[in-house]
Amino acid sequence: MLELLTTIYFTIGIFVGTLIINDIRRTVYIPKLRVKDYLEVFLISVFLWLPFFVWVFLEDRMGKSGGR
């Protein structure tokens, strides 16, 4: 349960952090943000962190089936 909460917390934190960095970058160069930019940031963060979450999920499943 703690691993799940940590994973959710990291997901939200990384997504929000990426949005903030993207906002700063866009504000310096282009002062307007579009929905496409948020979607692009979301997809990039999902694809970057998907292997980590899959690994955490599989490790959790293997540990439980291993008689822990």
Image (spheres, grey):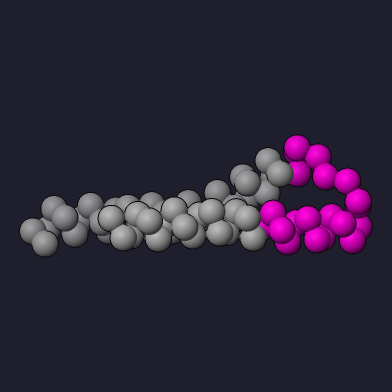
Q: Is residue 55 visible?
A: no
Quarter assignment of residue 56? bottom left
Relative image position of residue 61 (x, y in whole percent): 23, 52
What residue do we see at 81% from left, 40% from top? 34
Q: Is residue 8 visible?
A: yes
| Residue 67 percent across, percent down from the top left | 8, 58
Residue 32 spot, x, y in % from top left: 88, 46
Residue 60 placement (x, y as % from top left)? 26, 56
In the rendered image, the vertical position of residue 34 relative to residue 41, given as above or below: above
* Magenta stretch: dominant secondary structure: helix
Residue appearing at x 83%, y 45% in the figure: 33
Range covered by the magenta-colored residues: 18-37
Residue 6 highlighted magenta (yes or no): no
Residue 21 in the magenta stretch? The answer is yes
8 or 63, which lies in front? 8
Q: Residue at x 28, y 55 (%)?
A: 1
> Seen in the image, is 27 located left or right of residue 19?
right
Residue at the spot 40% in from the left edge and 60% down from the top edge: 6
Answer left or right for 49 relative to 66: right
- Quarter assignment of residue 20: bottom right
Q: What is the quadrant of residue 43 in the picture?
A: top right
Quadrant of the image for the C terminus?
Answer: bottom left
